[in-house]
Image (cartoon, grey):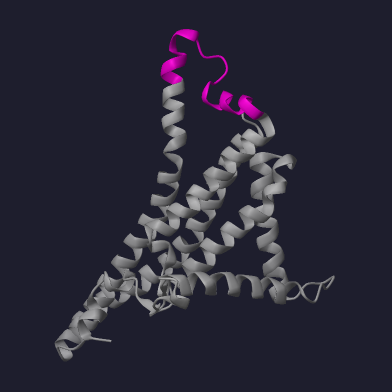
Amino acid sequence: MATSDKVDPIHQFHIVPLWENVGGTGFHFTNSALFMVLTVVVATLFFVWASAPRAIVPGRLQSVAELAYEFVAKMLKDSTGKEGMKFFPFVFSLFLFVLVSNLFGMVPGFFTVGSQIIVTFALALLVILVVVLYGLYKHGLHFFGLFVPSGVPALVVPLVTTIEIVSFLSRPVSLSVRLFANLLAGHITLKVFAGFVFSLGVLGPIGVVGAILPLLMTIGLTGLEFLVAFLQAYVFAVLTCMYLNDAVHPGH
């Protein structure tokens, strides 16, 4: 890796083709695709391995798996009630995908999948499509009552309905940008301070002394980014549960 790449905070987000023109289809297998595949494989293997013993007194791995399961299950049930538990596999998969991909991004040299707006927007759009399709399937045209809150005076119904529609349509944008922006900003900040450490460290003894503060900041930011990695997965899952509640109970 070139020296400029080590200090360039944007280089870590570059999409690099690893396998061009796969099977003559014109598609390229990139570093982003690789880490999405790894995310799915690692998350799947972990839960298969952790749940294999099925012990009455769970070991460490089984305890982690059960804790994650119960954490998401409670989140979904609190938001949508028992009727919404049919969406547990969907919400649990989203939570794990975002969490594991975020944790992969914390490993030096690895790629942060969530730093690509196209990935986060695709996930957010999937959530909204599930909400709309299930809402129409379950409630038919009554689903659109979601945009006309009960108790609103008839005079202001057009205005309120317009606001509700715009708010609903903006959900995939806000959901995707929130995840993308937090990961992008956090990794850039972390890389900037790490770059200061590298740049000052090559200047000799004086530079090494000057690099102490950026190094401490880098260590602190690394801990913060691990927290953000979990929080962003949690926020994405919570908002997904809230949106699914609109499909399950459109009148609430």
Instruction: Check residue 154 for magenta coloring.
Output: yes
Q: Does 21 appear above or below 118? A: below
Q: Is residue 99 left or right of residue 75?
A: left
Q: Is residue 15 left or right of residue 127?
A: left
Q: Position of residue 130 (x, y in %)?
A: 59, 45
Q: Nearer the viewer, residue 216 or 230?
A: 230
Which residue sits furthest front?
A: 24
The part of the image, by quadrant, that contains residue 142 is: top right
Which quadrant is the C terminus positioned in? top right
Q: Is residue 36 left or right of residue 46?
A: left
Task: Identify the residue at image location x=71%, y=39%.
Answer: 81
Q: Position of residue 72 (x, y in %)?
A: 65, 54
Task: Identify the residue at image location x=45%, y=29%.
Answer: 165
Q: Is residue 114 visible?
A: yes
The part of the image, by quadrant, that contains residue 159 is: top left
Q: Does 209 appear above or below 179? A: below
The part of the image, by quadrant, that contains residue 171 is: top left
Which quadrant is the N terminus positioned in? bottom left
Q: Is residue 251 visible?
A: no
Residue stretch in magenta: 140-160
